[in-house]
Amino acid sequence: MARLSLQYAQAGKSTLFHADRDIVLIGRGAQADLVLEENFVAARHAQLVISQSEVNVLNLSGRAASRVLRGDEVIELGETSVELLARDRLELGMAAGPTVVLNVLIGAEDEPAHVVDLRSLADVVGAHTSRQDAALKELLTVQSRIGEADDLDGVLCRVADAALDLVPRATHVTLVLRDETTKTDKLGSYVPVLTRVRGNDGRGTTPSSPVQITRSVFRKVVEERAFVLAADTENAGLASESFLGASIMSTIGVPLFKGEKIVGVIQVDARESQAPFDSTDVDALGVLAANASLAVANARLISQLESAERRLTAEVNFLKGARRAPPAIIGESPPMIRLSEQLKKVSPTRVSVLIEGETGTGKELVAAALHHGSPRANRLFVAQNCAALPANLLESELFGHIRGAFTGARDDKRGLFEVADGGSLFLDEIAELPLELQGKLLRVLQEGEVRPLGATASKQVDVRIIAACNIDLEARVREGKFREDLLYRLKVFPLAVPPLRERQEDIPRLIRHFLKHYAIEFGFPEARLAQNTLDLLTDYRWPGNVRQLQNEVQRLLIEAEPGAIVVPDMLSPDIQRTNGLVEKARRKRGSLKQMVEEVERHLVSECLREHDGNKTATAKTLGITREGLHKKLKLLGLS
């Protein structure tokens, strides 16, 4: 059965009547279910018939007036019944005389009706025609201001300021919004998002210090789906420690609706003031809420659309980059020739490949070449650094999630395994993959299945996994930090990328390539290197490998004057120190072995000094093991 409530003013106060039967008789007589005391109401004035889905009204008094006010429409009640709609007004009285107006509030049986709740207001409810006229003019102004805001924050701020403008006695306005990422309508999903206070100039401003928020008002609005106006907080059931502590003397809470769903609450307080709010304030805020509801809903929608647009743009740019052919692998040294031959053998297959090599050697470039040399070349090559994200975000990035899987999951998201379906997925720094995700990766390798976060079903994918690491994975297995069965699945065909110090003959080619590439990218003339500068760059050990060389060339190109020749003095300090050692060795007389040992002695001594005697760090910089460093120190007489 539909739920019906009637709100009306009688004896100087607002009264609320809840219908609890199928047929409700309204009149002045004692037999009436709803007794109206006004003498201009007939003893049996009107009858309401409440069914499962609707409420009908019938006029029982021929001489008295009965009509339904629906917006600007007036429906006179005659001999036939008229269906009542929510927010209609039922007017009963004399044909040409006083009347009483009942506000009609209708809801479904399992959903409480919208209730206008005016409690403890016997001394404040009344007609304020002049104030209502002024409020209507103010409403037109504030509605225009709200319409000018183009983002959610701007809309919320202008709605709050409008509430202060419409209610002169208000000192504080709080806006509460429902978190749309939650699927529940519980009170915990409603969050205060903005508070504005009246400044010294009378206009809304941001509070200079935290404002204590009372939750009892917006809880009552949400629970009872009611407009709440209280000048006597204890009798209205709103008194609480936080309420009294905030010195709130009077308050109004009005809901923001999206259809039949409450999406927020406007709470207006009069603090440190004895002047209570009245019904005119409620009327003004009710009209404001109607406009604000639409403005907030539109601003939220625009925000979501802009977010979706940014996400789609990023995905399009990502996919464009993923389809771009990789630059050629540069190198004609024996180690690079062997690597190229291995790539040609393994590329046509679908086996998993583990690329091993120091940081900066170009492992991702090798992975891209592996993909573009395979039958999957016309599909996507997708890369993800396993050390770049925390475990929870990495899991979502790789496997995807469904809406509501966790806080902030507003939409379904495809994981990189799905994005790369039919192509290749490159997992860099695979040693940093958390243990809890290693099992899920193993399932993809074994079964070709992925299950997004929050999903109940798995999805089939066809992805070639290419992994890379710069540390010893077998050592990680012994430490219990990496699954042995996953290592065997990944290391079906290992590829070793040589460090730059083992392919020195490739350094001049790489330098020429980078000079040309970045000259075009920066719009600079291509720089020329002096021969001794090129010699120093070729002789340097390059602990950061190709990436370090790439960065050095970019710096030189930016620093060099147009048309100038790059001389050794323009090189980085580390490389210049190498120059000093070489020059020192050249001046020393003796055999080749003696000169080499002298260079090594100075190089190792300098590196030890830079690392304050830390042998582990020194060995890493020199590209040798700690045990190798100890042997070298003993051989050079430095131990």
Image (cartoon, rainbow, N blue to C red):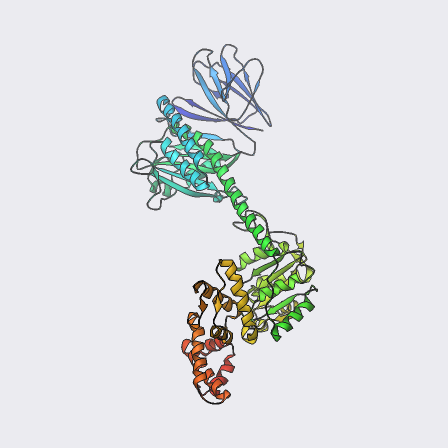
Taking the image as shown, residue 524 lies to the left or right of residue 52, namely: left
Q: Position of residue 609 (x, y in %)?
A: 40, 78
Outermost residue, front side:
563
Q: Position of residue 63 (x, y in %)?
A: 50, 9
Q: Is residue 55 above or below residue 232?
A: above
The quarter holding residue 427 reads: bottom right
Q: Nearer the viewer, residue 39 or 102?
A: 102
Q: Position of residue 53 (x, y in %)?
A: 59, 27
Quick check: can you spot residue 235? no
Taking the image as shown, residue 453 lies to the left or right of residue 522, namely: right
Q: Position of residue 275 (x, y in %)?
A: 31, 31
Q: Nearer the viewer, residue 86 or 583?
A: 583
Quick check: can you spot residue 274? yes
Q: Is residue 159 above or below residue 543?
A: above
Task: Please tell me which residue is depicted at 52% across the width and 12% down the height of the picture.
Answer: 61
Outermost residue, left side:
200
Task: Please tell me which residue is depicted at 56% across the width and 76% down the height of the picture.
Answer: 502
